[in-house]
Image: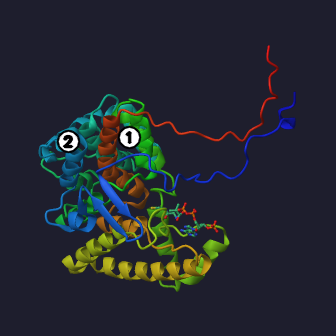
Amino acid sequence: MNLRELPIGDRSPAKASGLEGVVVADTRLSHVDGERGELLIAGRRAEDLALEDPGHFETVVERLWEISTDAPQPALREPLAQARTAAFARVPQLTRALSLSDPMDALLASTAQGSAGSDALEVLGALSVYVAAGARLRLGQAPIAPDAKHSAAQAFMSMLGLPDDPSRARALDAYWTTVSDHGLNASTFAARVVASTGSDVMPCIVAALGALKGPLHGGAPGPVLDMLDATAGKEPRAWLEDELSAGRRIMGMGHRIYRVRDPRAFVFERALARLATEDRGKSAIASRLEHARHVEHAAQALLRERHPERPLCANVEFYTALLLEAVGIPRELFTATFAIGRCAGWLAHVEEQRHTGRLIRPAARYVGPMLPPTVPR
Ligand code: COA
């Protein structure tokens, strides 16, 4: 029997193929209000959390994990530093994985290979070591050992070979804090699906990393900088129109949930403005920021003309690009750097999901050929 001749199942379009609006979990970790453009992380407004002094990344990790475990967390600065030291000791066995040409592939492979059996703290500590060591190895340079006295942000910068700079470390802290959690985004969902099967921590994070690699999720900030470079010193409109005519999307614009400007864009703009005023040597940051605002306004206006039915505004990735560039992170590491911050939330969600004890197993509608009815025997 030729399958093509058989009747097919229901082919009416699936209603919510992107699962928009479908609630599959309860969480106390973060709340995204897409209409008002508000983001709460661990019960605090993202901007308050990220721009307070001293707003270290470790603090938001402690808060998120306190919520997910329902238990007070010890200060994590020292244990995280120890986790980095332990991960660095594994670098010599991971050089092949770490040297893969795509930094996200390298992070995926090294996490899978080097972090089997690790707990949440060990995985979180390992990510920044793997990202930095991979970057050095790809340049033919020796990895730099983490300094046990450093905070997470200072350690990451020093492992990348960047100079010690408290203002830039503070900007990286603000960045990681802001991206630490964001509702049930694709990578967090991926982590929760794997956690729901009873798997251990590392595979949950590997699944999340795989989801984050995609340009529709975490892979946009590098292309945003390419766009800023391509439009530098010019009116951006013609360039943006060419992109849309070629069927490409404007990177850093639009969001599944936000119908207004992403609140994280405001946080990064403020962090950048703070960095730009902190010393005169950073005036390049101020002019880059000005250009980015110009491109953002041009892109928003153009997208409003093309999609009057749907507000498409700057998302987190737009100013991520600028902030990470200002910190000194090479653009090919932007998504991997995002992963380090978001890993705090992934791990908290893994814990939260485990508490539910419920396997996530949705259904698919079959639209392939049906078999003929069987004759009862
Ligand atoms: N540039 C151009 N057009 C865009 C756009 C963008 N950045 N974002 C959305 N659109 C258009 C789509 O082409 C679509 O048009 P159509 O209905 O004529 O096909 C419409 O707006 C709706 O897009 P859709 O893909 O349904 O929205 P979504 O909620 O699934 O998309 C994103 C959300 C983030 C995936 C999307 O806005 C996007 O691709 N942005 C660029 C990549 C990016 O910045 N990613 C980082 C996200 S934080």
Element on which disc 2 rests: loop
Q: Residue furthest top?
A: 377
- Left or right: residue 156 compared with residue 369: left
The amino acid type of the residue labelled 2 equals Asp
Q: Which one is earlier in the sequence, the residue at label 1 or at label 2?
A: 2
**Along the line of sight, the residue nearer the viewer: 278 or 207:** 207
The quadrant of the image that shows the C terminus is top right
Kindly tell me whether residue 180 is visible in this rendering.
no
Residue type for callout 1: Ile
The part of the image, by quadrant, that contains residue 316 is: bottom left
- Residue 246 image label: none
**What residue would you read off at disc 2?**
70
- Image quarter for ligand 1: bottom right
Question: Which residue is found at the position 48% from the left and 84% from the top?
Answer: 233
Q: Residue 373: x and y, percent? A: 80, 27
Percent from the top left, x then y, of residue 64? 24, 49
**Which residue is rendered at x = 27% and y = 64% of the image?**
46
Q: Is residue 97 or residue 137 the one in the foreground?
A: 97
